[in-house]
Every structure is written in C-alpha cells, then in structure tokens.
Image: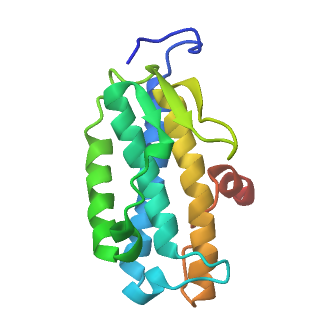
C-alpha cells in the first residue's frame, strides 16, 4: 500500500470514516437479520429472475472479502471472488462468512487506513481486459456500501415475493431513507 497520493484531496475526518464503517456495519447487519429470518429453502429458491437470495448474499460477502484481501496487498481485485457455492447454498456457511467479515471490520486499524491509496481491478466490459484504477480505502468502503445496498434491494424483492416481512428500510439507500423521513 502506498501513502496518500495525488487522488487524495486531504485527510478524511474521523467522523467520515466512522460513518463509512457504520454504513458497512448497517449492510452486514441487514444480511445478518435476513439470515436469521429465512429458512434454508427460501435462501436457495430461485426467483422469477432465476436468482436466489443466497447468490446475492454470496456476492455481497465476496466483495468484502476481496476488499480485505486487497488491504493486505494494496491491490483490490474484485474479479478474484471465489464464487463459493457453499456461501450461496448454505445459510450456516453464509452466517460463518458474515461473522468473519464483521470481526475483520471491527479489527481494522482506523487510525492508519483512511486515505491509504490502492489499486482496484475489475472487469467493466466483457470484451476488454480488466480495468485497473487508483482508489482509496475510504472510497472503496463507500463503494461496498453502495454495492451492498443495491443487492440488498434485490434481496428484499425476492424475500417479499416469498411472503417474508422485512423492515421498511431494508435494502434502501441511506439518501432515500433520509429523503423519506423529511
């Protein structure tokens, strides 16, 4: 990992990093609430879109796993997801992975990581090589929140179609929640 570089416009405030961590916790907590609510069949039942709740949960968790692997190397490769079928097909495996990620978030050194620059790799077009761009620890946390919220919204649609009652704000973007509360 490199120290703060040209893409960093200045140090991130403690309040901002706390908000980012709280946002990640909120997303992971929604996953936890979901896993406590569902049964195994609901977790793996294919929706009309031919997708399962388990597939979306796996995708959320694996993005976090790639993020944490990238902190160690200075390069986050979101294409390096393991696509672990056990997380997708087994609530207990998903719960174990979720607990592990929650512990990793809790143990992050928030005094050293904000503003840290890193490279991010990901395929953005199927007929092109993967893109590699500079980013920061903070920006990637924000991206994890946005990405997770998007998948949680899809999960909410699938769960509701199966008859589950979810909290009103489940899978909603923070900006939408704030707007609706005005």
Specify whether 92 is left or right of 127: left
Quarter of the image holding residue 163? bottom right
Give x and y (percent) for residue 151: 58, 61
Q: Residue at x 29, y 69 (%)?
A: 93
Front residue of 101/128: it is: 128
Give x and y (percent) for residue 13: 49, 22
* Residue positioned most to the front: 127
Specify whether 147 is left or right of 124: left
Give x and y (percent) for residue 116: 43, 20
Specify whether 75 is left or right of 99: right
Front residue of 84/30: it is: 84
Quarter of the image holding residue 160? bottom right
* Residue positioned most to the top: 6
Quarter of the image holding residue 69? top left
Residue 30 seen in the current view: no
Q: In the rendered image of this protein, does residue 37 appear above or below residue 14? A: below
Specify whether 125 is left or right of 121: right
Q: In the rendered image of this protein, does residue 106 appear above or below residue 115? A: below
Front residue of 182/144: it is: 144
Q: Residue at x 26, y 54 (%)?
A: 100
Q: Residue at x 38, y 85 (%)?
A: 40
Q: Quadrant of the N terminus?
A: top left
Front residue of 125/180: it is: 125
Give x and y (percent) for residue 143: 57, 41
Residue 164 seen in the current view: yes
Q: Quadrant of the C terminus?
A: bottom right
Q: Residue at x 59, y 25 (%)?
A: 133
């Amino acid at each position: 990992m490199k120290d703060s570089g040209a893409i960093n416009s200045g140090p991130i405030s403690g309040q901002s990093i706390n908000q980012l961590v709280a946002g990640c916790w909120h997303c992971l907590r929604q996953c936890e609430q979901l896993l406590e609510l569902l049964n195994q069949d609901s977790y793996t039942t294919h929706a009309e879109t031919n997708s399962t709740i388990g597939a979306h949960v796996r995708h959320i968790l694996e993005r976090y796993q790639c993020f944490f692997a990238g902190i160690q190397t200075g390069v986050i490769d979101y294409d390096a997801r393991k696509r672990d079928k056990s997380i997708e097909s087994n609530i207990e495996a998903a719960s174990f992975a979720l607990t592990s990620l929650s512990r990793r978030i809790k143990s992050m050194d928030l005094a050293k990581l904000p503003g840290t620059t890193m490279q991010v790799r990901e395929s953005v077009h199927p007929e092109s090589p993967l893109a590699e761009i500079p980013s920061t620890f903070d920006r990637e946390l924000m991206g994890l929140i946005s990405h997770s919220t998007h998948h949680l919204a899809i999960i909410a649609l699938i769960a509701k179609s199966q008859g589950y009652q979810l909290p009103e704000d489940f899978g909603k973007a923070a900006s939408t929640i704030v707007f609706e509360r005005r």
